[in-house]
Each structure stands twice: as C-alpha cells, then as structure tokens.
Amino acid sequence: MSTRGRGLHGHVLDTLGPAITSGEYPPGSVLRTDELAQHFEVSRSVMREAVRVLESMHLVESRRRVGVTVRAKAEWNVYDPQVIRWRLAGADRPHQLRSLTVLRSAVEPVAAGLAAQHATAEQCAELTECALGMVANSRGHRLQEYLFHDVAFHRVILNASGNEMFARLGDVVAEVLSGRTRHEVMFEDPDPAAVTLHVRLAEAVRARDAARAEELTREITAGALQELDVLAP
Amino acid sequence: MSTRGRGLHGHVLDTLGPAITSGEYPPGSVLRTDELAQHFEVSRSVMREAVRVLESMHLVESRRRVGVTVRAKAEWNVYDPQVIRWRLAGADRPHQLRSLTVLRSAVEPVAAGLAAQHATAEQCAELTECALGMVANSRGHRLQEYLFHDVAFHRVILNASGNEMFARLGDVVAEVLSGRTRHEVMFEDPDPAAVTLHVRLAEAVRARDAARAEELTREITAGALQELDVLAP
DNA sequence: TGTGACGTATAAGTCTGACTTTTTATCCCT
DNA sequence: AGGGATAAAAAGTCAGACTTATACGTCACA
C-alpha cells in the first residue's frame, strides 16, 4: 500500500523520505543531487523529481550552489499522509502516535456532533453495522476483524460530518488504530467499555442527538489517550 | 509569499495548481505532459517535475499510455498549505473558508487547554502582548494592525499547546483570519466581545486554567462561525 | 586591519533528443 | 463473437551539454 512502485522516483522516495523523517539526515544536513543519484543508481532527472516531491512536503529546501538542505522539523508538512506513514514507521513513532491521538481527541467529537446532524440514513445503517461488527469480534482474540470494523466506524463518522477537512483525516485515524493493534502490546481483547461507547454513539447519531454523540466521542478519544499513557510512559 | 519564484516549475505550479483546484480541469480530465510543456513553454523535464509535485498532493494521477488524470476532490491533500492557498484564491473560497473555520472550532479549544498547561512564561507574555495589541487597534479602522496581533495571538496558542499537529495549523489560521479581513466585508471595527474574549483567554492561560481557556476559545471560534453565517448564507 | 569589489568555482537548473516500458486499443483469425 | 497477437501512444528513463545563480575566497584600497 505505502510502496506502490509508481516508478523509480517512488522507490527513491520510499528510502529517502524515511531516512529524513527518522533523523538519519538531521535538519541542516546538505545533500547533493548528483551524489544521491549515484547512490540510488538513478539518473539525475529521476533524482530531481524525488527532490521536488520532498521539497513540496517541506522536508527539504533546494538552493543553488548549496545543495538540498534538510529543513527543521517544525517546517515539515506533518499532515501529508506520506509523511505521517514515514514517521509512524520510524523511530519517533510513539511521539507521533501521541500527537495524532491528541488531534483525534480534538477533531472527532466535533465531527461526531456534525455527523449526528448530517448523516444520511445509509450512513446511519453503516454505523450500526460497524458497531455490531465490533461487538461480534470483541472477544476471542479476533483483533484483525475488530480493527476492521473500528476503522470503518470512525471513517463513516468523519465522512458523515460533511466537512472535507474532517473526512480527509480518515486515513490518519486508520493508521493510528491499525498501528496500535499492529505494533503495540495489544494481545488482550479490546476494552468492553470502548465497545459499548461505540454502540451508544451509533445510536446517538441515528437519534440525531448531536450533544450526546459529541460527549460519547469525547469519552472514546479520552480512552484512547489514557490507553496510550499506560502503554507509553 | 505564495509565488516564490523557485524556478520554472514553480511558475508552472502557480498556474496549473489553481487551475485544477478551481475546477477548470474537472476531476477525470486527462492532461498530457508534452502538451502542457508546450503550453507553458517549458521543457518536458520541468513539466514532469511539476506533475510530480501535483501527484504528491494527490491532485492528479499519472499513468502510462493514459496521461495525467485529475483526481476526485475527495482524494486531494487538503491539508497541504499550498493547496489551501490555491483553493482560498479560487472560486470555492467561501466553502473552503467554512471548512477551515469548523476545523478551527474543533482544534483551537483543545489547543488552548493544552496551552494553559504547557505555555512557558515567555509565551504567556507574548500572549498578553498580542491581546493588548488587539485592544489598542480595535477601534478606528486599524484593521491591518488588529489582524497582525490576532494572527500572532492564535499562533502562540497553537505553538504553546506543545502538539506539533496543532502548531502546524498556525499558517491555516493565519490564512483564514487574514482572508476574512482582506476579502470579506469587514469595514467595521472588530466585535468588542471578541476582543474581550482574547484578553480573558490570555489571562486564563497565564493562570493555568485549562478548562476556562478551552471554554473561552470555544466562544471565540463559535463567534467566528457565526460571523461566517452572517456574511455567507 | 578592516572592508568592499571582483572573480571563480560549484551545484542546481534547464534543455534536447533518443530510447525503453507499460498499457490500451485495434485488428485479425478462429 | 471471443480471444490472442499486434501496433500505437504516452509516460518513464537516461545521458550529456549548457545556463544561471551564488557562496566564498582573493585582492586592492582605505
């Protein structure tokens, strides 16, 4: 998924991107296009295209007579899904996971409130379906199946909010949730309280109760934050 | 600011990017690199670099034997500052402004709460300074000066939250605020209630009162949303 | 000794043309 | 009509030559 071989420049990015975001090339480092091209055994044209992409993500800055300079972390386009994926795969994964979870705790409650106002009948149906799927897979170590429905649930909420900025966070939430299941210690079944909250949230949206939907989502994201505190001190 | 002449490919992007985000090339449209290169009177290499950047923003998809296809709006990286700027300059500016303001109403209250917990003494000082600047310029049609302090105020809050995802929304908030002053009808002095709220928010952060900071920011963003409702029906 | 003008080396930027690869559409044969 | 060979089209890749901006060192002059 992350590595779709869409050409040589894609392969270069898949190596160089993580190298930069992981700090292998610290901010201020100067790279030279020619050297990189040799190192990756690609032509300068391909290398230049890769550098342009990194530049558009504000990871690097290219200046004449100087080279390609790695920018300060504070300048990176941290909302770029590609950058998020690179960072989640790298060393500061825990830190990144926390940042994103805090973002979730801000955005999702408001999104849920809007979803309660704007969700179509179809979206309400999807929501209850996902919630039921979560319940059905909440026991017996069916983590993959549970995750699938959990991700789908939050995606529907974000989409149903009717706000495109919220909707585009679906991928981010998916990464956070799946990352939690994949990498962190999560051998046990999911918290029953969380499952119940999702079921009640689906009901609240169906009932057009925006305030309740918002409050329930606050509890869900608060739980996610708390869980993170337990796992990563 | 937006058009920094960082080369020919930058100039191409400044034309082609807005053309795509404004719907001049609707989703599904197929462009050909060679034709575009001729049209912009640049070499294919330059054109290819521009296309790569657009591709990294998920605005287009490049496929062999087909061409460069404009992607559906739902796939765009709408958090990319460049994309945001292009869209704010285009036709669906009102829609975009609303989306971003809703995002603000979700993020800023939580950010303010965190800021109250983590702000340094220096940041607290900056905050009160900005608030005073707003007060000083809240009368007498000093809109530019008021805007300057308003933007700085919200930037400090987002930075002080200690969350990098929030911090990177500083530019977005700046665009929204300055856009409001620049394009919309805002000949009158700013709402005195809003000014007061900012002053009180600075106090709340200084007093480490997270709950109050969050609530005050909710009122501020609610006001911004309401203002938008009045101006754009 | 400090300072400013000047020249030079360097690395990115640009262009061109030839070649390769992938994918799609067409055509032909069964 | 269906399926497989074939051709065409567009992106992808590469190599090499040239251009341009600019950091840095040098040297003359104050």
Image (cartoon, coloured by chain):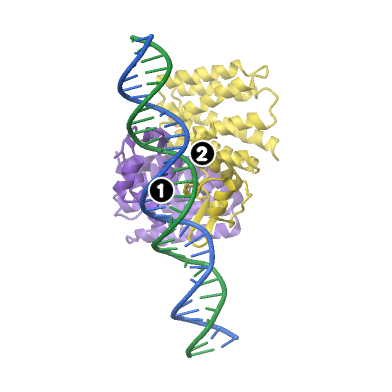
Chain colours: A yellow, B purple, C blue, D green
Give coordinates of residue B121: x percent, y percent.
60, 58
The dot on residue B130 is: none
Bin the neighbour count of mark 1 within 10 Å (Cα to Cα): few under 14, some 14-19, many 20 and up: some
The residue tagged 1 is: B45
Secondary-structure class at tag 2: helix
Residue at horizontal 45%, vertical 44%? Answer: B80
Say which quarter of the image contains residue A233.
Answer: top right
Say which quarter of the image contains residue B83.
Answer: top left
How many numbered discs, if any?
Answer: 2
Answer whether labels 2 and 1 touch (C-beta < 8 Å). Answer: no
Q: Is residue B169 visible?
A: yes
Give coordinates of residue B46: x percent, y percent.
40, 49
Residue at horizontal 55%, vertical 43%? Answer: A12
Q: Is residue A54 visible?
A: no
Residue at horizontal 41%, vertical 48%? Answer: B45
Q: Do discs 2 and 1 share a chain? A: no
Give coordinates of residue A19: x percent, y percent.
61, 46
What amino acid is labelled 1 in the image?
Ser
Quick one: B165 or D24, which is closer to the camera? D24
Q: Quadrant of the C terminus of chain B?
A: top left
Secondary-structure class at tag 1: helix
Give coordinates of residue A217: x percent, y percent.
54, 30
**Could you tell me how far apart the alpha carbons at marks 2 and 1 are, in whole angstroms?**
26 Å
Looking at the image, residue C10 sits to the left or right of residue B174; the answer is right
Looking at the image, residue A114 sits to the left or right of residue B88; the answer is right
Quick one: B134 or A49, which is closer to the camera? A49
Q: Nearer the viewer, mark 2 or mark 1?
A: 1
What amino acid is labelled 2 in the image?
Pro
Bin the neighbour count of mark 2 within 10 Å (Cα to Cα): few under 14, some 14-19, many 20 and up: many
Chain of the residue where label 2 is placed in the rendered structure: A
Chain of the residue where label 1 is placed in the rendered structure: B
The residue tagged 2 is: A81
